Amino acid sequence: ADLTTVSLPQTIIRMAALKNWKSSLFDCFEDVNTCCYGFWCCPCLACTVSGRFGENYCLPLSCGVPLFVPPAALSMRASIRNKRGIAGSLCKDILASCCCVWCSWCQMHRELKEHTPVVVVMQQPVT
């Protein structure tokens, strides 16, 4: 019974540490404009968040009447959290989306306002 030892290269994967949301779920007064926007017209704020994240602006409106968990709010929240490397879990996303969907949309909006790059297009003068 001859045993052969095979050496395989090791792959080291380093994961970046997860960070927290820029503001907590109930930090509405940290950004009063977002708070008012979400309070007076949450569907409009939801569409803005969806568009800023690169999804279709009308995505939040496609849900109709939410049953128990608003599907667009939950999926958008989980996606933002995963793409931005924000700590959390699907269970916490469900709780935020169910218990206070307005605060959840406001928190997502504040997060995207912090990270959304501004693109400036300049034209060369015609000579």
Image: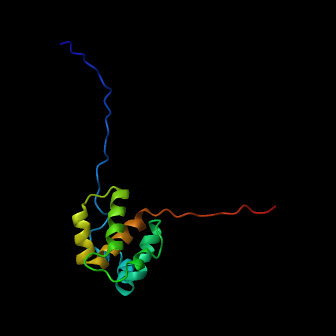
105 or 111, nearer to the observer: 105
Residue at 49%, 62% in the rendered image:
117
On screen, residue 106 above or below 3: below
Viewer-nearest residue: 17 or 1: 1
Residue, far front: 1
Q: How many marks?
A: 0
Where is residue 125, by image quadrant? bottom right
Residue lying farthest to the top in this orientation: 2
How was the colour assigned to the protein in this rendering? rainbow
- Residue 77 at x, y = what percent? 33, 67
- Residue 14 occupies which quadrant of the picture? top left
Q: Which quadrant: the C terminus?
A: bottom right
Spot the residue most to the left.
1
Question: Quadrant location of residue 41?
Answer: bottom left
Compared with 87, 50 (above or below) is: below
Q: In this view, does 125 lie above or below 69?
A: above
Question: Residue at 43% across / 74% down in the picture?
Answer: 59
Where in the figure is residue 64, as x and y percent of width and height? 37, 82
**Residue at the (30%, 73%) spot, across then down:** 104
Measuring from the top left, give residue 72's x and y in whole percent.
36, 73
Q: Is residue 91 left or right of residue 12?
A: left
Q: Quadrant of the N terminus?
A: top left
Please tell me which residue lies in front, 13 or 62: 62
- Which residue sits furthest bottom? 40
